[in-house]
Image: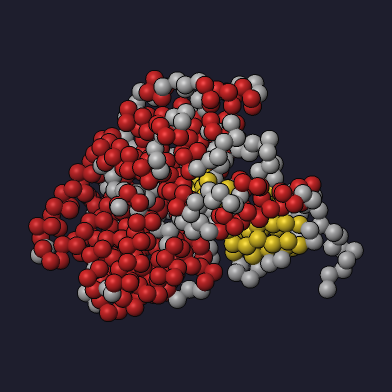
Amino acid sequence: MSDPQRQPSIRSDEDLSGRQLGDFRLLRRLGQGAMAEVYLAEQASLRRQVAVKVLRSRLAEDQTYVQRFRREAQAAAALVHANIVQIYEVGEVEQVHYIAQEYVQGQNLKQWLQRNSPPGLRTTLAIMRQAAAALAKAADQGIVHRDIKPENILLARSGEVKVADFGLAQLSSPDQGAQLTQVGITVGTPLYMSPEQVEGKPLDPRSDLYSLGVTCYHMLAGSPPFSGDTALSVAVQHLKKQPVPLEQVRPDLPPALCRIVHRMMAKTPDARYASAREVLRELHHVQTQHLDDPWPEGLPGWDTAGLDLAPTARADATQRLDVLMKTVQLAIPKRSRWTAWVAAALAAFLIGGVLGLVTTGDPPLLAGGTELAAPKKESAFAQWLFASSIGTEEGWESIKRYFGEDQYWCRRADQKLALVYLYQKRYGEAMAIFQEMARLGAAESEFRAFGLAGEYVVYALREQYDRAAVVLAELAPIRNALRDEQMKQLLREVVRRTAAHADDQTARQWKEFINEQFPDAG
C-alpha cells in the first residue's frame, strides 16, 4: 500500500501531474476549461496515451454539474465515429470525477488559425466535411453538441478532424437532458451560439449547424462574423444582424461554398439545412465541380505547409489519374474491371503522395519511375512528413530504418508500404504486413482493423471469396476502429463489388457501415 503521507488527498484544483486515477497515471496538464482540466495520461493496462478530463473540485460539490459531467461521457461514448473523440472510461477516485478519452495529437482549429492564414478550398472542404460527418452521426443518435466552436474541432497530425467536448451535449428526447440545464443558465459560447440557443429555446441538431456555419465563417474570413464588448452584445447580433457576405471577404472562393456557410447561419432553423447530411451533399457538389478530387480524400498532416495545391498541379495530377483509369479499363476484361478500380484508387493515393513535389518542379514518382533518396530527419514524425512528401517505398522504409524503435510510426509506415505493394500487385508482401497487423491485440485495434481489411481486399482480389468472408466477419466487430482513409475507400468498393458472395445479413451490415462512413454515397 502507498504511504498515506506521500499520497495526500487529491483535489482537482491542484496540478495532479504524477498522480494515479484508477488505471491512469497523469503525466502533465494539457489545458483547462470552465468545467474541467485536461491531462495527458498513460493507461497502465493497455500501455497507451489518453487524455483525462478532471472535473473542477468546486463543481464536484454540485450534483447538477456532476450529472452534466457524467452525461458528457454517456453521450460521447455512444458516438463511435472516426471524426468524434472517443470516450474510454468514466470514473471517480477520492471524490475526483474524471473521464478518460482518446488523445488526439495535433492542435485545435483555433490554434491552427492563429498560426496560419485562412485556408484555401481544399483544406476548407476537408475540415467542413469531417466536422459535418461528426454532426451527422450525433444527430442520428439524437444528440445536440451545443458548443461547436474552433476550440472543439481538433486537427490531428494524420489529417483527421475530430469533434471534441460533448460536455454540453443534450439528448433531444424531451424526457431527458433538459433538467441538466437550469432555468436562466444558457450554456454555449456566445461567439458561435445559435439564435434559438441565445433565447433559451429547445434545441435540435440544426442549432449545431448554425454554430458550425459561424465557425466556418471565422475560419474563412479570419474572424467571427459578430463581435462586441460583452457577451450580451454578441448574442443580440446573432438574433438581429446579418454578417458581411463571405463572397465579399473571400472572392477567391466558389460562390456555392459561401452560400453553404450562409445557409447554415440562417437566423431560423427552418431556413437552414434540415440535417448535416444535406450539408455533406452540398459540399460534395462543390468538391466535384471545383477540385475533381476523390471523396472523401486522405490529406497530409496538419503540421505540414502547403495543403492547398496550385490549380495547375491539381489539374496535372487529375489528368494523370484519368489517363490511368481509362488505360486499365481498356486493358482488363469487363468482369474484372472492379479490380482495376482498386488499382486506380491506389494509384490516386500514390499520386497524392507526390503532389507536393509538382510545385517545386521535381519529377513525380508515377511519371519518372525513380525513387527519391530518403535522408535521416531529426525525429520519427519529421521522417514521416518527408516520406509523405515523396510517397515512395524508399521513403516509407526509411522510417523503419532510422527509427525502428518507434513502434507507432513504424506501424504507420507499414500501412503505407502495404498500399504501395497492393498497387504494384506484390500481394504476398502486402499480405505479410496485413497478417502481422491482424494478429495485434485489442490495444492496437486501429492497426488490427487495417490488417484485417487488407487481408479481405487481397483475398477478394484473388477471388478467394470464402476466405474473404471469414476475414470480413472477424473485422466486423472492430470495423469502426479503421481510420486509414485509403483503406476505407478500398474496403467500400470491394465490399460493394463482392456483395453477391456474402449472405444477406453480412451484406446488410456492411451496407450500413458504408452509409455511416460515407454518408454522401447514399
Residue 23, position as x, y percentages in the image: 68, 67
Residue at x 26%, y 71% (from the top left corner): 460
Q: Would you say 466 lies left or right of 215 here?
A: left
Relative height, residue 497 to residue 189 (above, below): below
The answer to whether residue 266 shows anywhere in this view is: yes
Relative height, residue 3 to residue 365 (above, below): below
Q: Would you say 66 lies left or right of 251 here?
A: right
Between 139 and 174, which is closer to the camera in this rendering? 174
Relative height, residue 253 to residue 34 (above, below): above
Residue 244, position as x, y percentages in the image: 45, 20
The answer to whether residue 101 shows anywhere in this view is: no
Residue at x 28%, y 57% (from the top left corner): 346
Relative height, residue 163 to residue 477 (above, below): above
Residue at x 49%, y 58% (from the top left corner): 80
Q: Would you say 42 lies left or right of 113 here?
A: right
The quadrant the N terminus occupies is bottom right
Q: Residue furthest right?
A: 5
Q: How is the image coloured?
A: secondary structure
Residue at x 58%, y 23% (from the top left corner): 236
Between 72 and 38, which is closer to the camera in this rendering? 72
Residue 243, position as x, y percentages in the image: 47, 22
Instruction: Tally the numbered discs.
Output: 0
Q: Would you say 63 lies left or right of 272 here?
A: right
Residue 233, position as x, y percentages in the image: 61, 22
